[in-house]
Each structure stands twice: as C-alpha cells, then as structure tokens.
Amino acid sequence: MSDQSMENYYKELYEDEKKKNEKLTRELVTAEVENAEMKRKINLLKGSLIYKSIMPFRLAWSHTKNAITRVKRYGNISGVIRKIKSKRIEMMAYKYHGTESFPNAARRQEEENHKFKEDHVFSILVPLYNTPEKFLREMIESVTAQTYAGWELCLADGSDAEHSYVKKIVDEYIAKDNATGHKDRIRYKKIEKNLGISGNTNVCFELATGDYIGLFDHDDLLHPSVLYQYMLEIEKTGADFLYCDEATFQGEDINDMITLHFKPEFSIDNLRANNYICHFSVFSKKLSDEVGHFRSEFDGSQDHDMILRLTAKAKCIRHVPHILYYWRSHAASTAADINSKTYAINAAKNAVSAHLKSCGFENFEVESTRAFPTIFRIRYEIKGEPKVSIVIPSHDHVSDLRRCIESILDKTSYENYEIVVVENGSKEPETMEYYEALKKAPKVKIVNYTESKGFNFSKLVNYGVKNAEGEYVLLLNNDTAVVSRDWIENLLMYAQREDVGAVGCKLYYEDWSIQHAGIVIGLGAHRTAGHTHYRLAKDNLGYMGRLCYAQDVSAVTGACMMVSKAKYEEIGGFAEDFAVALNDVDFCLRLREKNYLNIFTPFAELFHYESKSRGDDTDGSNAERAARYDAEAEHFRAKWSKVIKAGDPYYNPNFSLDHSNYTLKASPAPMVQ
C-alpha cells in the first residue's frame, strides 16, 4: 500500500471513529436528560400524600420478604432466630478487637516493667515507597507505642524524588526516639534506585541486628502489645516462627473493621491453598539466615513464598490467637482489591509450585478458585492406579442402597475400585432380591456380618475392611449418592500422601445445604464434635473462603472417609466401644496422635440423606437411642478430655462452640498476662 493510500485509509478511519464518538456523546446527553427527568418524577412521587400513606405497608412487605428469604435459607423460624442472635453477638464482639483491646495505663505500665528471662530484639522490616504522610506517621507510631521496648525499626526507602518528605519524616522520628535514650532503634537507608518489593525488603534485612525478624507493611498498624505477647510465647515455647490474627480496616479509624481474620494453628494444606498466615509474621534471625531472604521473582507474593520456606524449616511454629495486626484497606492496597496487583496472582501460584517441588511433589497443578484468585485448588498427581475398596454397611432400606450403588457405578470416573457391602441382618425380600442382582455385578461383593446381635457400626466397618482387597479403604454410608464424577480421585490424591491419615468430602442434604465440611472438636451442645458450616447453602464460600479449598481438620465424617488400609490397620481400625456415635471422630483423633493429618476437600461431593436407615440418635424421638448417644458422648468426653480442653487447633478460640458458622464469641479469648 502506497503512502497516499495509507494516509487516506487513516483519514477514513479517523472520520468513522469521530462520527461514532459524536453519536455516543449525543446518546449519553440524551440518557442524562432522561435520567434527570426520571429522578424528578420519582421525587415528586415520594413527596405525594399517597406514597407517604402506603409507606408503612411497603416497609412491612419488605420485612416480610426478608423473613421469607431467611426462612428458606436457614430451614425454619428457629434457624432464622439463631442466625439473628449469632449476628448480633458477632457485631458486639467486633468492638473488643479494636482500640478497646489496647492496654490501659495500668496494663501498659505492667507490660513495660515485665522482666523476661531473656530479652530479644525484634527487627521490624518496612520497605517504604512513596508512603503517604499520614500512613507513614501512624505506622511508625504503632511501633514506638509498643509496650515491649526491645525492637528496632528498619526502614529502606525506595521513594522517588517527588516523595522526599518520607526521609524528613523518618528523620523527625529518629530524633524523637533518640531523645528518649533509645539510640539507633530506628534505622533508615535511602535506596537510590527502587529495587521492587523484595529488593527493598532485602535492604531492610541488611539493616537488621535483632535476633527476631518481623515483616510489616508501610501502610498498616501494630497492636501496642504484639511484641509483648510474642515475647511471652517465645519464653514459653522457644518459638522460632510466630503469627497472629489480623483485621482489615478502612478509613481513618482501625475500629472501622471490615474483616476479622481469626486463624487456625499451623496448617500446611491451608497455607498451600492460600497465605492465611500473612501478618504479623515474626521469625528468628537464625531461621531466616538458613532459608534466605526475599526472592524478587515472587514480587507481589513474596511474603507467601517466604512463609512457605520458613515454616518448612521452623522447629516451633506458634499462633497467637488475638487481633494484633491491622491491615489498612485503601484504593492501592491488596487488602482492598487483589486486582490492583494482578501480578500477585501468578507470583502466588509460582510460590506454591516452588514450595511443592521442594517438598518432593513432581506433577501437580495450582489453579485459582471461584472464591478468590489467590485461593488455590491443588491437583496432586495420583501415583499408579491403586485399588480402592468402598465399604458400605447396610441393613434393609434397599432403595437407599440401590441409589448409592447406582450413583457409584454410573458417575465414578475412577475405574479400579470394588464395592464391599457389609450385610447386617436384613430381612426384607426386596433387599435379598437386590443382593442377588448385585452378585452379578463385577465390582460388587457382599459379605455377611453375623457376629453381633446389637447394632455396632464400628464392628461392621472393621469387618468390611478385613474383607477388602484394596490398598485404600473408602468408608461410605448407604444413604449417600455421588455428585462429582472425580470424587475418588480427589480423595485419593490426598490419601496417597505419607503425612495424611483420613480424607473427607463435602456432603449435601437433599436441598443442597451443607451437611459436612469438616469436624471441629468440642463444637455443639454435647461439647464432643460438630460439623462446620452446617446447613449453609451449597454456593456459600465459607468463613474466609474455607468452603473453597482443601484444608487440615481434626476429623472428618465416616459417612464418606478414605484412608490407606495400612494406616487403618496401624491404629487398629474403628474403636468398637463406640458402637454408633463418634467412632469416626475417635478414629481421626487416633490418626492425629500418630502425627497424620486429616483433610477435608470440597472437591469431592456427595449427597447424604443422613440417618435415614437408623434415624437420628440426638433428636430425642427414641429414648433408648438417645440414652446410648449420651453414654457414648460421655465416653468420648472422658477419653479425649485433654484434647477438648486444649481446643481444636484448626478452630480459633475466639469462635463460639455454640454455632457452626464461625460466629465470634461475645467476648474475646483472654490475652496471656
């Protein structure tokens, strides 16, 4: 094409675009005029006598619709009332985690005068970059306000020339702190060329002389007692890695909290799925020297990479269960919107991948989930095609058993499995007819249990496992039905890991509300164990996205549980002194005693038409069954009293044990004095 032709082409293109823009402008002006007229008419209507007279009826209808929606969501009126009460308690609890939790004058003096057996110096690292003056001053003052004086603030400043005020403000605080007799506690270095997040932080490392390192963002705030609380934990346990709970706040006041993040004790699978530890991470200088400093290739998720490496080497990881870090949410922060730092998503995936490779995993996939782009689903490689034995205890209720087995045969994508039906005294002719039909199915076998007259689920399960040929055992209730085709793969990929004991799935009631998503010790009226996120909707993301990723839990339900046969036999199978209730929880706790992890994965999904075969022992409709449940609950509380008293490590002590949806207690867990 000649130069003249090119010029004509671009002229025509310009004229076309100009006409389009003019048309869009006219349409926009017309729309604005129409919108203004519509607003005028609405305002006239709202000011009319008729509108005002029907206002009470409109409000009543609005409240009625809300009530109907809540009843549908929570099942019944009592469910709505419980939800309203828990929400009210939770809103009251918020105030205890802001400035109201700060030490008063007497408490401050007590903390400042406390004598530790060994004093440690915390080097708090803060990379500065064009930090707004207000944020900078508040950040520094949250450090100088610490009740424990053994700290140094290491500031590496990569700000550009337009933000030269950063150095002037820091110099001001250096002079103030030096005047109090604490010479050189605030250490500052101007970086001539911005080195990025990791590079700037590594300059902070060079300034550090303390024996513990803390990572602190330039626009956030620390609780005045955080270092004091960490010192108490270090003195008590010798911890070389510590973290705390945190809050996200917006505006001018930290009490304007929009999220309170109460975390579990160290949970490796949670950490691989998302950086739940995040703030305020503190670790020994010795540990950081061993694993190295920040790596620039993970900028945007450098903390996640660092925490994964540190915790992999740490000898004592401790979680302090209090809000001691305040994460400021503003337009440019990741706290406000991860999409403001889209590069962080790929960096986080790469950090998790690098960690998994360092742990010996070879073939896996790390992908973002629907909850949040930096909450990940990890697809581990399944090694070989080991046989899985699906053990199903059964007594009549043939329609339930048929639905269960047909769902397995029709929907399961994994091929190498067998179904072991443990027959326990069925009498109905229809059941016998179905058994005869099952005998022709190549993947199904029926074993008859006749050793005990009374119902004992543990004995049935143990008998079934004894007759199982598979390398892995999948315990399954007969009142379940498969939802996700790859349910076995999603259980097996975890059960194959050497560090994993039992693996459980996500179970739904017939209305798609959640029946099981992991078990918490001590939860519920009996203070034995209970299901989390109970009765929430299928698409609910869960507390901090917990319904969207595989995670460590204390126990999973025996209604659908996979475990290697070797580990099952190692701990002696199900304890037969728990005939009906809590045998699965007891089994999981015994696995935990052997230092195995129990995992819940939301990616294996089934229906559970709970207790249809036997009924519910806890509803009081059958006095004999209720008495038996009470006896087994008492036995469980006695056997696991120390575990119950210590609290579930995967459930923060600030959560109420009366609610399954991570409702806060009316008052916070007390800080260590």
Image: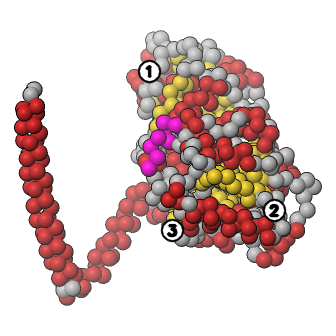
The answer to whether 581 appears left or right of 570 in the picture is left
* Closer to us: 133 or 514: 133
Above/below status of 405 relative to 349: above
Q: Residue at x 43, y 48 (%)?
A: 339
Disc number placed over residue 225 in the picture, else none:
none
- Residue 344: x and y in percent read 50, 42
Q: Say whether residue 471 is magenta.
A: no
Q: Residues within 10 Å of mark 3 (few under 14, many from 20)?
A: few
Q: Are marks 2 and 1 in contact (CB under 8 Å)?
A: no
Q: What's the magenta region?
A: 340-348
Secondary structure of residue under mark 3: loop
Residue 86: quadrant of the picture: bottom right
Please name the colour scheme applied to the rendered image: secondary structure
What amino acid type is highlighted by mark number 1? Answer: Ser
Residue 483: quadrant of the picture: top left
Q: Residue at x 71, y 45 (%)?
A: 205
- Residue 503: x and y in percent read 61, 32
What amino acid type is highlighted by mark number 2? Answer: Lys
Per the model, the C-alpha gap separating discs 2 and 1 is 67 Å
Which residue in the structure is indicated by mark 1? 413
What amino acid type is highlighted by mark number 3? Answer: Gly
The C terminus sits in image quarter: bottom right
Q: Residue at x 43, y 31 (%)?
A: 484
Per the model, the C-alpha gap separating discs 1 and 3 is 51 Å
The N terminus sits in image quarter: top left
Secondary structure of residue under mark 1: loop
The answer to whether 525 appears left or right of 370 in the picture is right
Per the model, the C-alpha gap separating discs 2 and 3 is 34 Å
The first of marks 2 and 3 along the sequence is 2
Q: Are marks 2 and 3 in contact (CB under 8 Å)?
A: no
Which residue in the structure is indicated by mark 3? 251
Which residue in the structure is indicated by mark 2? 183
